Image (spheres, helix red, strand yellow):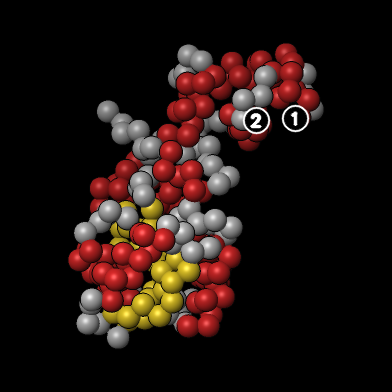
Amino acid sequence: MIDVLIAEDMHLVRGAMVALLSLEEDIQVVEDVGHGDEVVEACLRHRPDVALVDIGLPGTDGISAAADLSRRLPGCRTVILTGLATPVALRRALDAGARGFVVKDSPAGQLAECVRRVAAGEQVVDPDLAVAALNARENPLTGREMDVLKVAAEGAPVDEIADRLYLSGGTVRNYLSRILSKIGARTRVEAIRIAKQDGWLWPDDLSEIGLVRHRPRT
């Protein structure tokens, strides 16, 4: 029997997953939680074989929970659940020690099969998404340019960016000009959009991950 913990903050989604997986003869859901801060402690209590963890949990996000589980309970294999799969989310999930990456609207049978394969020691990732992650464009911006872009993404004008980063207004304008040139954007708004699409600007709140859409390369 494969013991599973489900961490999902949307009650209807969590209830549906519990009900669907409970129909499988070889899978039992030992616990379900709705907050990121509950994940690790619940896993330490129940020691499940597999933890299905939503990427955008409130409190501790799914990526952080996966990394913590990998350190504290390596026998529990984590599968990250997301409403929208993106290459950058996949890379961060795998870096955190996740063994699977599943889109929430996958068929029930596919989710159950993922649980079985991960429990057996396999890594389960959609092959098209894996290729997209490998082919994703590298971030051409320097650390300081990213600092400027992050503050700009909050809607801050040049003077505020300068004050917060202890720069002159002219230096900020020079940074913004270089950012546009490197990214291939015409405006600051477009540069921010591209940086989010390519995963260079990662949301502080991972519940926003559904807003970060993969931009296929042509």
Is 177 or 214 nearer to us in this picture?
Answer: 214
Is 199 or 82 nearer to us in this picture?
Answer: 82
Which residue corresponds to the image point at 73% horizontal and 13% vertical from the top-left? Answer: 170
- The quadrant of the picture occupied by the N terminus is bottom left
Q: Is residue 172 left or right of residue 75?
A: right
Q: Determine whether 143 is above or below 17 in the image.
A: above
Q: Position of residue 34 (x, y in %)?
A: 49, 64
Which residue corresponds to the image point at 35% horizontal and 46% vertical from the top-left? Answer: 84
Which residue corresponds to the image point at 50% horizontal and 77% vertical from the top-left? Answer: 43
Q: List the residue tagged with mark 1.
A: 165
- The quadrant of the picture occupied by the C terminus is top left
Q: Residues at badges 2 and 1 in contact (C-beta under 8 Å)?
A: yes
Which residue corresponds to the image point at 50% horizontal and 57% vertical from the top-left? Answer: 57
Circle 1 residues within 10 Å: few <14, some 14–19, many ≥20: few
Circle on res. 151:
2
* Amino acid residing under circle 2: Val
Circle 2 residues within 10 Å: few <14, some 14–19, many ≥20: some
Q: Which image quadrant for residue 136?
A: top left
Please say whether residue 13 is visible from this viewpoint: yes
Q: Position of residue 182 (x, y in %)?
A: 51, 22
Q: Secondary structure at mark 1?
A: helix
Q: Which image quadrant for residue 161?
A: top right
Give the CA separation, mark 2 to mark 1.
9 Å
**Mark 1 or mark 2, which is nearer the start of the sequence?**
2
Q: Is residue 40 left or right of residue 144?
A: left
